[in-house]
Amino acid sequence: MRFAPYPEEPAVPPEPAPESGGAAVAGGVPHARSATTVAPTSESTEADYEAALPYGLPGKPLRRGPFLFGLVGGLGVLTAIAIAQMIVHSLSVIILVVVAMFLAVGLNPAVEALQRRGLARRGAISIVFAGVIVAFVLFGLAVVPPVSKQMAEFIAAVPGYFNELTGNATLRKLDADFQILPTLRAFVTGTLGPALASGVVGAGLVVLNGVFTGVTLLVLMLYFLGSLHTIKDYLLKLVPASRRERTRRITEEVLDGIGGYVAGNVLISVIAGVLTWIFLSIADVKYALALALVVALTDLIPLVGATIGAVLVTGVAFLQSVPAGIACAIFFIVYQQVENYLIYPRVMKRSVDVTPAVTVIAALFGGALLGIVGALLAIPVAAAIALVIREIVLPRQARS
């Protein structure tokens, strides 16, 4: 290893070696010259060069040692904790962004179908987005008026219930003995009234938060839908050029699978809602449209969504009349068999390729981690992981 002389001196040409008995150091430097003025040669070692310098080699203030190791490790732990706290505090925003991207990928096949019919992408996005807005508005118009009407009827009936209680002979006797009505009145005015008022305020805040979240979700979905190809091309540039084409094909297949799953799930929910609305209208069940929309919304949830919607609607029908409740129970039992064994396989045969066991396990894990949103996202994520394993991991293992 060759080093520059320190301190720098004019180069000294080597002197010829004596014919006999002359001692010379390696490199042609005479023995009479001091070692401090000699530049090391290719045969010199680093130790010899360090010994030849008057002040030694320049120091290294951050040599590897326990202090540096502990400092770097502590900073790494603090950084990991800070990142974890950031993720926890922004988890709701992350979920919102992921759901918006998921919906954009799911609506992209509809946009591309309109593009194949000659529409520009901007026009196709506008039509699809307008359809989503109309669906939200119809859901609100179908659900809000019945709920408001039921609440108004209940509030109007409360004084009548109170008068019936005060007119009861047994209750009047108990009131004379134990002063029940004054205690009940004090409870209503002192505890229940403020609690209901705060509950109304809290419910109003929840409604406002839901409206804000819905609007934000729609805006994010619109932006992602408009820039989906740009985002995909930018992310593919991060992949090495030799693997970019294969990654592009796998990505397209994954996105097609997710889009097919979302489109198929929405189609199945629409079928469930329409058939439920037709049946409830024939059975003369009140608020048939609102109950049908509830069934369509809950049917989006994998595994248990259809059962939840059926139980809710059947319970409402039982409150109206026992025959209507029994008819609803029979209808949902028959319809779920038709959906599980006839409608679902035909709709989903070109969307996701996941075995039933993996579907159940993915939905359970997704629901445990992120609730309903996790259950919705679990199946396409499992399909994407299965595709990556089939296209990348298994061929690599076969070649090894």
Image (cartoon, rainbow, N blue to C red):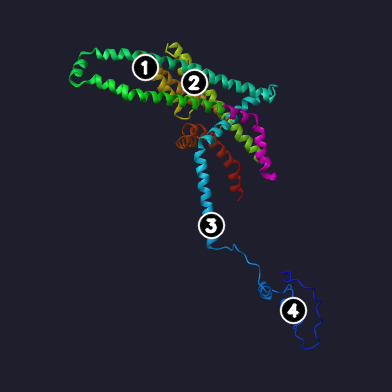
Mark nearest the camera among 1 and 4 is: 4
Give residue 314's position: percent from left, percent from top.
Answer: 40, 19
Q: What distance separates the C-alpha of mark 1 from that of mark 2? A: 20 Å
Proximity of marks 1 and 4: CB atoms separated by less than 8 Å: no
- Cα–Cα span, label 1 and label 4: 107 Å
- Report the side of 27 relative to 127 (left or right): right
Element at label 2: helix
Is 222 magenta? The answer is yes
**Residue hosting label 1:** 318
Q: Nearer the viewer, mark 2 or mark 3?
A: 3
Badge 3 vs badge 4, beta-carbon distance below 8 Å: no
Q: Which residue is mark 2?
A: 272
Picture quarter containing residue 258? Answer: top right
Disc 2 and disc 3: Cα gap in Å?
60 Å
First in residue order: circle 2 vs circle 3 = 3
The 10 Å Cα crowd at callout 1, few under 14, some 14 to 19, many 20 or more, is some
Which stretch appears magenta?
Answer: 218-246
Question: Which secondary structure dominates the residues rendered in magenta?
Answer: helix
